[in-house]
Image (cartoon, helix red, strand yellow):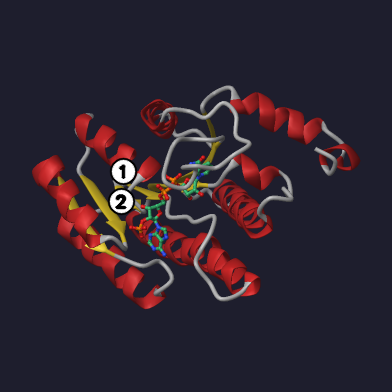
């Protein structure tokens, strides 16, 4: 299993839990010191590359070098994401979110898809969000970036189905989960323990589900959002 964005929060917990279950795991992230300490903790079944997903050439080369080191790839989890970024203006902050959550995602999704087409089968997991289900006033680029990747994955899933391609695509939509991203944020509810949310996510990955809501109760919120008319959603 290759986890893009494994240095903290959901990705780090997924790496730990997958190793405990016997997977060979590769993790990536920009923070090299975190990757080194994960290697010390997780041992020989963990390998890593320092990677910034906004550097497309470098991230592509590193993905392929991890695949070589692992002797192949069965599952890739595209987890890297940001909800905020230091920037000199609102516009550049919003561009930075799109660069990571959309452009970085599309690049590695495409590379993984081509790889799995060559090997004949595989599994791509993308971490979107309940936030992608509507345009929240709190964070427009974040909500829109998650909507983009959800629709993108749905379209690829349809393509696999209609063209008989044996690639599973799982769209994981977490609600609020404890992590560096949510640390200190106000106005959250049902904030899940990271370990618990990731445990459920890994079960859904192993079941090769098309959609995974973590924790489970967020499926109800997703359902309510879909049923709520826009005029009402826009007032919430
Ligand atoms: N926590 C929640 O409530 C929640 C809810 C819904 C969806 N999600 C999604 O879940 C995913 C994981 O988030 P988290 O909550 O676990 O937050 P987190 O602890 O901040 O983890 C984000 C991960 O993405 C990596 N990353 C960020 N920018 C990157 C870049 N330019 N290149 C490579 N890696 C990069 C980070 O690694 P480095 O900083 O080392 O690069 C880190 O490993 C995100 O996609 C997020 O949108 C989270």
Mark 1 vs mark 2: which is more N-terminal?
2
Q: From this viewpoint, is residue 71 visible?
A: no
Q: Position of residue 144 (x, y in %)?
A: 67, 56
Which is more toward the observer, 200 or 124? 200
Using a 10 Å C-alpha cutoff, classify the residue at mark 2 as few (fewer than 14 neighbours), some (14 to 19) or many (20 or more): many
Q: Pointers 1 and 2 in contact (CB under 8 A)?
A: yes
Q: Position of residue 177 (x, y in %)?
A: 48, 35
The residue drawn where x is 43% and y is 32% is 201
The residue drawn where x is 21% and y is 54% is 35
- Identify the mark at residue 7; answer none if there is no mark: 2
Q: Position of residue 73 (x, y in %)?
A: 28, 52
The verdict on label 2 being within 8 Å of ligand 1 is yes
Q: Report the number of numbered marks.
A: 2
The quadrant of the image that shows the C terminus is: top right
The quadrant of the image that shows the N terminus is: top left
Extreme-right residue of the structure: 231
How much space separates mark 1 and mark 2, taking CA atoms? Answer: 5 Å
Using a 10 Å C-alpha cutoff, classify the residue at mark 1 as few (fewer than 14 neighbours), some (14 to 19) or many (20 or more): many
SS at mark 1 in the image: helix
Position of 91 compared to 59: left or right? right
Q: Position of residue 92 (x, y in %)?
A: 59, 74
Query: Height in image: 89 above or below 174?
Result: below
Query: Height in image: 57 above or below 164?
Result: below
The residue drawn where x is 84% and y is 44% is 234
Which is more toward the observer, 61 or 143? 143
- Residue beneath disc 1: 12
The verdict on label 1 being within 8 Å of ligand 1 is yes
The residue drawn where x is 49% and y is 56% is 82
């Amino acid at each position: 299993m290759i986890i893009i964005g494994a240095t903290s929060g959901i990705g780090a917990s997924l790496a730990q839990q997958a190793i405990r279950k016997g997977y060979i795991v590769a993790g990536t992230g920009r923070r090299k010191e975190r990757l080194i300490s994960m290697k010390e903790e997780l041992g020989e079944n963990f390998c890593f590359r320092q990677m910034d997903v906004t550097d497309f050439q470098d991230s592509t080369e590193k993905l392929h070098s991890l695949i070589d080191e692992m002797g192949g790839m069965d599952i890739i989890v595209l987890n890297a994401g940001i909800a905020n970024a230091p920037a000199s203006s609102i516009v550049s902050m919003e561009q930075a979110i799109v660069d990571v959550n959309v452009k970085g995602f599309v690049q590695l999704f495409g590379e993984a898809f081509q790889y799995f087409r060559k090997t004949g089968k595989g599994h791509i997991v993308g971490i979107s969000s309940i936030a992608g289900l509507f345009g929240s006033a709190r964070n427009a680029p974040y909500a829109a970036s998650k909507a983009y990747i959800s629709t993108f994955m749905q379209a690829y899933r349809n393509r696999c189905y209609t063209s008989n391609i044996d690639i599973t695509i799982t769209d994981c939509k977490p609600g609020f989960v404890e992590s560096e991203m949510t640390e200190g944020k106000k106005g959250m509810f049902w904030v899940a323990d990271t370990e618990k949310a990731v445990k459920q996510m890994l079960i859904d990955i192993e079941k090769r589900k098309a959609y995974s809501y973590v924790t489970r109760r967020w499926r109800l919120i997703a359902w309510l959002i879909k049923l709520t008319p826009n005029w009402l959603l826009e007032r919430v």
